[in-house]
Amino acid sequence: MPTDAFDVEHLPHFTRDEFAADFDCVLEKVERGCDPILIRSAGTPDLLLMGWANYWQRFECLHAPGEREAIEEACRNYKEPE
């Protein structure tokens, strides 16, 4: 697990409105490895958005063995409601 802490003041950040307005662009940044990204609400940190691999690298210890595989399998099998 990485030992580097998040310095929220230096993370790339967007307000919730900016995030909603340019959702695809923000997700593209995450996919290119520019993560984590901080989403602010009312001027304070609110949400942290990061790529899947980054999340598991940092927080794998919070999950039971095999849980990642089960989640990924559920995502592969998910069908949007019609």
Image (cartoon, grey):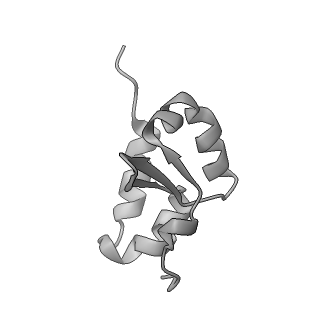
Q: Is residue 67 left or right of residue 16?
A: left
Please state the horizontal and vertical placement of residue 50, each as a whole percent of the image: 51, 57
Residue in view at x 47 percent, y 74 percent: 58
As rendered, which of 15 and 78 lies closer to the eye? 15
Q: Is residue 3 left or right of residue 82?
A: right
Q: Is residue 82 above or below residue 19?
A: above
How many marks on residues?
A: 0
User: Can you name the residue that lies furthest to the front here?
Assistant: 43
User: Can you name the residue that lies furthest to the top here?
Assistant: 82
Residue in view at x 35 percent, y 46 percent: 42
As rendered, which of 79 and 49 lies closer to the eye? 49
Q: Is residue 35 left or right of residue 1?
A: right
Please state the horizontal and vertical placement of residue 64, each as a whole percent of the image: 29, 71
As rendered, which of 26 and 33 lies closer to the eye? 26
Q: Quadrant of residue 74?
A: top left
Please state the horizontal and vertical placement of residue 56, each as a whole percent of the image: 47, 67
Residue in view at x 61 percent, y 51 percent: 30
- The image quadrant where one finds the C terminus is top left
Please state the horizontal and vertical placement of residue 10, each as a whole percent of the image: 58, 67
User: Can you name the residue that lies furthest to the right here?
Assistant: 32
Residue in view at x 42 percent, y 43 percent: 75
Q: Is residue 58 above or below residue 32?
A: below
